[in-house]
Image: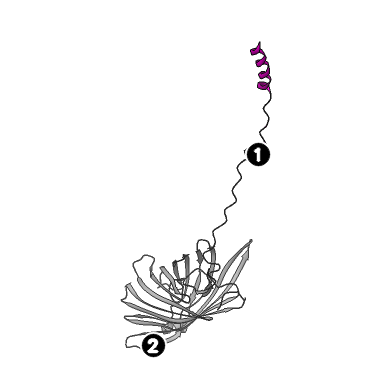
Amino acid sequence: MRLITSSLLILPLLVLPVRDAPAQTRQSPPSSKPAASPPPPLFPKHRRGLYINNDKLEVIDATPQSPPLETDDPSVPDKGEYEINLLTEADLGVDAHSVNVFTVDANYGVVLKGWGHELPTQLKLEVPIAAEGGHGSPYEIGIGNSAFGFKFNFYNDESRGLRVSVYPQMEFSTGASVEKGVAEPGQTLVLPVLVAKESRYATVVANAGLSKAIHDDERGTMANLSVGVGRAFFRKLAAMGEIHSSSSTSFSEDRLVSANAGFIYGVRRAIWYGRVGHSIFSDDGPHAFVAFGMKLLIDTAGHSGAQP
């Protein structure tokens, strides 16, 4: 009898519905992770010439660039900024000397807009006073091969320090200079691609391009390749070097491979630079190279932190 009574008391407990667990014991669905923010840029703003680093100090731009090197960098002046290079350079070959006595290389920064995008662009005009001469012969002086072009900086990834530009240019000359032998006849279309990779230790720049002669059957298409490395050793002093090569597209004529070392030193709004180099291989004998000049930065847009 006692067993039957105990069973009657336990049976209702077995058939009672299971109640929901308390709210605090329920397992909440996994929350989605917040979207990862992009990594910070290597530099708050890397500008040509002088710029502000992460420590809020003004330092020199150590990117390999032309001038002083043959290798050029993909960066362009900021909108409304002028960059004017005043340069003297010489190519001293065994049989002939080619000297740009005084070159004015004027550049201006603009921003092209279209289809919801902005394209940082550099306008370039270069005019050299050139001299050509050989051993025992007098120098001929005139306006050398001038150049006009646009540098389109179409890719910038500041978090990775990667920049890419194309730099189409047209070189041209005057008839009198061609007769003197200080400029090449016809025109030359130059189309290089410029790539730069920055790190906290050095900056590497690579160039690859073609030079196509126009209205001159005696000159063929040339291929140009170069790689440069630059590093700042003090706040306003940087050193850089490059390997530069040019040849016909068949790589069998007009071959020249050279090594160059350069420096850039910044003071106020003027930046001084120089270069020395020598040929490693050449079809027409050894060459020595030297250049010296200054860069003037004229900021008409009032960019903060650009100048000391």
Assign the N terminus to one quadrant of the image.
top right
Q: Is residue 298 magenta?
A: no
Q: Is residue 17 magenta?
A: yes
Secondary element under disc 2, as helix, strand or loop, is loop
**Residue 55 x/y as whole percent:** 53, 70
Secondary element under disc 1, as helix, strand or loop, is helix
* Model colouring: one colour
Query: Would you say residue 221 is visible in this rendering?
Result: no
Q: Is residue 22 above or below residue 282?
A: above
Label 2 vs label 1, nearer the camera: 1
Q: Residue furthest front?
A: 2
* Residue nearer the viewer, 25 or 252: 25
Residue at the disc numbered 2: 139
**Residue 117 x/y as whole percent:** 61, 62
Kind of residue at badge 1: Gln
Q: In whole angstroms, how far apart are the C-alphas of marks 2 and 1?
A: 94 Å
Magenta-tinted stretch: 1-26
Q: Earlier in the sequence, mark 2 or mark 1?
A: 1
Kindly identify the residue that appears in the image at 65 percent across and 39 percent down. 24
Kindly identify the residue that appears in the image at 58 percent across and 76 percent down. 81
Residue at the disc numbered 1: 24
Q: Is residue 141 above or below residue 304?
A: below
Q: Residues within 10 Å of mark 1 (few under 14, many from 20)?
A: few
**Residue 108 x/y as whole percent:** 56, 75
* Residue nearer the viewer, 165 or 267: 267
Q: Residues within 10 Å of mark 2 (few under 14, many from 20)?
A: some
Query: Would you say residue 292 is visible in this rendering?
Result: yes
Residue 80 found in image quarter = bottom right
Q: Main secondary structure of the magenta part?
A: helix
Kind of residue at badge 2: Tyr
Assign the C terminus to one quadrant of the image.
bottom right
* Residue nearer the viewer, 156 or 181: 156
